[in-house]
Amino acid sequence: MPSGTGGTAEAAGAKLLLGAIRWDAWVGGDWAVGSQVNRTLSPKKYEFRLPYYAGITVPNRVLIDEPAQTLLHDESTTQMVELSRPFTPQSRAVTVEWDWKETVAGRWARAILVSGSSAAVDIATRSDASGTQLVYRASDGTWKVLQPVADDTWYSLKVIADPAPPQGATPWVDIFVDGVRRANHVPLLGAMTSFDRLSLRTNETLTSDLYIRNLSVEVTESVNANGAVQSVMDQEIHYAAAAGIDYWAFVYYPQAPLSAARNLYLSSAYKNDVNWCAILDGNFTGTFDANLPALASQFSTPNYQKVLGGRPLVYFLSGADADKVAKLRAKAAELGVANPYVVVMGWTAQGAADLKTTVGADAVSRYATGSMSGAPYSDLAAAESGLWDQYATAAGQVIPTVSTGWDKRPRYDYPVSWEPDYTGFKDTWTQQATPAQIASHLGAAVSWTKAHPASTAAGTALIYAWNEFDEGGWICPTLVEIRDSGAPLRLNAIAGVSRTTARRGRK
């Protein structure tokens, strides 16, 4: 049984408990959240993030790749000039990208995604009394403005078109201009079931010069990271236990199918090899009273993580208030369970400290830490090390976070529905950490905890994250690690970190 499940650890050299955050909403294959995460991780450049159990379902995901510049020079007022690029018919979503500019804007340049002989998506430039604009043709035949355009100016366009979305949703198209989504899930022009050609063209009746470059067509969803399988969960437990992970902190989704991974964990024959606890957010706290009994019933089980001699460990990521914390404690008392050790997470030290005081929590922590604009991981680690001091000074008791990375650019390339404000993700990233750097940062957290026993009574640290692959933080083995090295490199590095800390009581 993992350490910290009960009893005391008062001898000198107690072992620091090590938790890892699990975000499992995306686990489960081709349903709404899972499909979106599959799409964020589908580009070849993100293959190194895929979990070890992922499958590459479309090995030849790139259908067209033409970076070179092409000029469509049109001197005719009776014929168009066209760049037509057929590709293997696709009955699933495709992502089409290109840059273009007109020497004189608004000359009715067109970009048409074609299904057979019919237009599925139609984008054009035009000039009218209101100005020179980039527009798209709506399903009712009218033209809708995307944004103004100017002469001799490059614009980067991206179209994501899905003829058969998951769960029977209505087929849709998203249109992006210079990284900003200008049309969101608008209908296709007809009942299309596949796409097979891209046409870029000038207008039949107007002369123009249309420049095109960086033309590409790719299958949008070419991987399946389906972790909703008992054998996958069992193997994850084995990996975590071998690396010395004491517990997983599950972001607690009470509702199916988002609860699939936690339920697989609870049904595993190996669940006692790695403990668990809950991180509560709006999915739980939105209907707190209804969800509390099921969670509280787990507090007395041997594999629910406890600290300080038997206190169930509970994190609040959001939605904490004094009433909810009081109800949590009262429910535990009603069940004859020790008083829960409640930890509130905050993005600033003072904000977390204020929340701790307001709701009556026991300690503070932080979900993750990142750096900007491609900073080296060492910058992230240094900044986060400073945050441990700030949080301890502000709040007294702290559970230090050890972030393994931060890079949400996959969600910039393919925005997900639950983060509509995605444009900043382009610059919100940190360079990838090596396994040795992650181990060094964890070692620093162990040393810091040893040096601050009065502020770390719970005797635990929290890794971000086990499986936040498309956010940039993970220690779960990846497909590339296992394929190329035959070993879980990050976990092996973590396993090599001594976690002996100062003498501490757990009563």
Image (cartoon, rainbow, N blue to C red):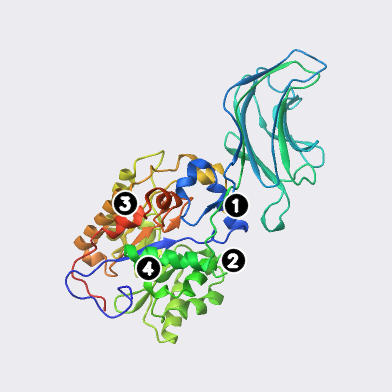
- Which residue is found at the position 45% from the left and 68% from the top? 234
The dot on residue 417 is 1
Hey, what amino acid is under mark 2? Answer: Pro
Q: CA distance from mark 3 to mark 1?
A: 31 Å
Mark 4 or 1, nearer chain start: 4
Q: Say what amino acid the circle numbered 3 marks.
A: Ile
Q: Earlier in the sequence, mark 2 or mark 4?
A: 4
Name the element at disc 3.
helix
Q: Position of residue 391 (x, y in %)?
A: 31, 58
- Residue that badge 2 annotates: 257
Discs 2/1, front: 2
Above or below 175: residue 416: below
Q: Residues within 10 Å of mark 1 (few under 14, many from 20)?
A: few
Q: On the picture, is 86 further left or further right than 386?
A: right
In terms of image quadrants, where is residue 259? bottom right
Task: Look at the numbered discs 2 and 1 and tell me whether their residues touch, using CB distance below 8 Å.
Answer: no
Q: In the rendered structure, are the residues bearing label 4 and label 1 in contact, judged by CB atoms less than 8 Å apart?
A: no
Which residue corresponds to the image point at 57% horizontal and 23% vertical from the top-left?
Answer: 68
Distance between the alpha carbons at the discs numbered 2 and 3 = 32 Å
Q: Mark 1 falls on what kind of element?
A: loop
Which residue is under mark 4? 247
Instruction: Name the residue at 36% across, 40% down.
Output: 375
